Image (spheres, grey):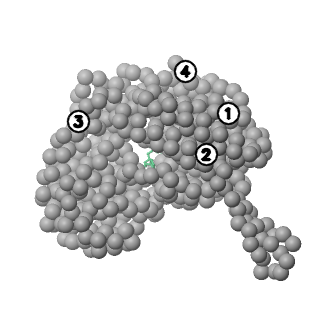
Amino acid sequence: MSFANRIGDEWRAGATTRPNINPSDTTEVVGDYAQGSALDVADAVAAAREAFPAWSRSAPMDRHAILMRASSEVAARTEELATLLAREEGKTLADARGEVGRAAQILAFFAAEAVRLMGETGPSIRPGVTVEVTREPLGVVGVITPWNFPIAIPAWKIAPALAYGNCVVFKPADLVPACAWALVDILIRAGLPPGVLNLVMGPGSQVGQALVTARGVDAVTFTGSVGTGRGIAAACVAGTPMKKVQLEMGGKNPLLVLDDADLDVAVRAALDGAFFQTGQRCTASSRLIVTDGIHDRFVAALTEGMAGLIVGHALDPATRIGPVADAGQLATDLSYIEKGRAEGARLVTGGEILNRPTPGHYLSPALFTDASNTMTIAREEIFGPVACVIRVRDYDEGLTVANDTDFGLSAGICTTSLKHATHFRRNVEAGMVMINLPTAGVDPHVPFGGRKGSSYGPREQGSHARDFYTTVKTGYIG
Ligand code: NAD
């Protein structure tokens, strides 16, 4: 079946289509998706510009109603959408259900945000003059998303953009257009006027590039890798007019395990953080920093826990770890595993290609010990089921190692010491900090984002999202 782009009030076929391949069974085509062109982007931007004056002045309660209808439909279709998600991306059905549920929650949260947006008013320093601070939508927002959360990330960008009165041109990841298409279809049928939400699928180098350089786009929100993000930010400020830009990028997230940690809690946090969702999370704990006194017990228990992680087809209920998302990512994972070995880390378990009844990109979760924080596997984001254990003397050295990275998205500590937990929370250089919890797994109603190479610009999610999707106006009334 073929799926078209959405431009203005029409579903428009692309010049070509791209098959969406199931990574659990590469003989299965999930669907054929239109490949858009620079011309399609130009038309989508024009349609969004035309829709903006009316949409930006629409009644907040109408925007609320549309987003709520979309939320209800996503929730009602959880099983079907989760199956689609698991088929196109490879995360397990249970994880996919969680992600679809999250998309529904996000749509509901921002539905309420639409009617929660209020300004401030107060006296000027000049007698008889009043000051009023209000927020206005930006205009047309370009939304560019990665492949690892095919429905939740599009939802957490599109929902606030629409709630605050912006129009959207959405370019999903080429690898996973099915959930993106379904979400757009749901939002359109929920009552969005023509042109308010447009979808142009296709490669980043063409469709994405056309979007970030389009004159009619006022802002770009991007989630993906650092290299792509850097180029997008440069393009956004190089053009006229300059575009507001928000980047959410990679991570090399540390989980610090101290001698006084509850071993079960630490092992559970490491298994989840490092390997669930095949390690393909920006918040994955790829650096396990472990103090001397617990190191050997932790490695033994973690290795035992990993032996119980069943790798298999995403739709098999027994599967805990689905396949790697595609052949390119699998090759990347294998090359990092080779680099880890070559640089002197010890591969304790995993890192092998697995054969399953269906042809897919199956890789056993890999754990390195004897790693140092200077090795490539400890410095660069791998984005696969690969973690390394770095042994440290004590908490102080652990914190130093945790902060010695170009990234700063999420960081975790496992300890029963209030002193160390508190000190870590205050001193670790990350946007999100987890105490006795996995580094991955966040709430939808609070800010999400990081520091250094992980994030650039205002935070996403929760009410803080308005800092990106609106612009502030200060009025003086004499
Ligand atoms: P990617 O950078 O390759 O692609 C992301 C998106 O950008 C895709 O839609 C792609 O088509 C598009 N793109 C590529 N080149 C472009 C260009 N020149 N101009 C405009 N758009 C372009 O990333 P990916 O491989 O899809 O996703 C994995 C990355 O995403 C990892 O680094 C991961 O950490 C990151 N990620 C970050 C977060 C977060 O919130 N911090 C969440 C999920 C994933």
Q: Which numbered disc, 1 or 3, marks the residue that appears first in the sequence? A: 1
Front disc: 3 or 4: 3
Which residue does the numbered mark 3 point to in the structure image? 310
Res 49 → quadrant: top right
Q: Which mark is residue 191?
A: 1
Q: Position of residue 401 (x, y in %)?
A: 30, 67
Q: Quadrant of the C terminus?
A: bottom right
Q: Which numbered disc, 3 or 4, marks the residue that appears first in the sequence? A: 4
Which residue does the numbered mark 4 point to in the structure image? 2
Q: Amino acid at mark 4?
A: Ser
**How many labels sit on residues?**
4
Separation of disc 3 and disc 4 at Cα?
34 Å
Q: Which numbered disc, 1 or 4, marks the residue that appears first in the sequence? A: 4
Residue visible at 61% across and 45% down in the picture: 111
In the displayed structure, does residue 240 sit left or right of residue 337?
right
In front: 368, or 344?
368
In front: 233, or 267?
267
Front disc: 4 or 2: 2
Res 189 → quadrant: top right
